[in-house]
Amino acid sequence: MPCLRDHAAGTLTALDRYLHERPGGMSGALSHAIRGAAIDAVLSGTEKITKESLAVVPLDCASETHGTAPQIVR
């Protein structure tokens, strides 16, 4: 599997709490979010996954409505 050209090692581990809280601990939704952000990174040319790029990936209904999804403040 090719790597994203500009993705810094350790980025996802630094987002561990966010990556657990946003999908409500649901591993399928977490996988979907990371995969979606990676596809967006390739298509947009940014070649990296960020908290902001993860936040725009829509999750399934159960994950989005579990009540603990943090909001991104810009």
Image (cartoon, grey):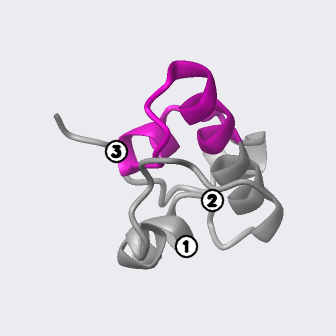
Q: Callout 3: 10 Å neighbours few (<14), some, many (20+)?
A: few
Residue under numbered circle 1: 20
Q: Position of residue 41 (x, y in %)?
A: 55, 34
Residue 54 among those drawn in magenta: yes
In the image, residue 20 above or below residue 30 = below
Q: Which mark is residue 23?
A: 2
Q: Which residues are magenta?
A: 36-58
Residue for point 35% across, 76% down: 14
**Residue labelled with disc 3:** 71
Residue 48's x, y, as percent?
46, 46
Above or below, 69 against 48 in this view is below
Circles 1 and 2, Cβ within 8 Å, touching? The answer is yes
Q: Report which quarter residue 2 is drawn in.
A: bottom right
- The local crowd at label 1, few if under 14, some if 14 to 19, many if 20 or more residues have their Cα within 10 Å, is some
Total numbered badges shown on the rendered structure = 3
At label 3, which amino acid type do we have? Gln
| Residue 29 painted magenta | no
Q: Residue at x 69, y 61 (%)?
A: 30
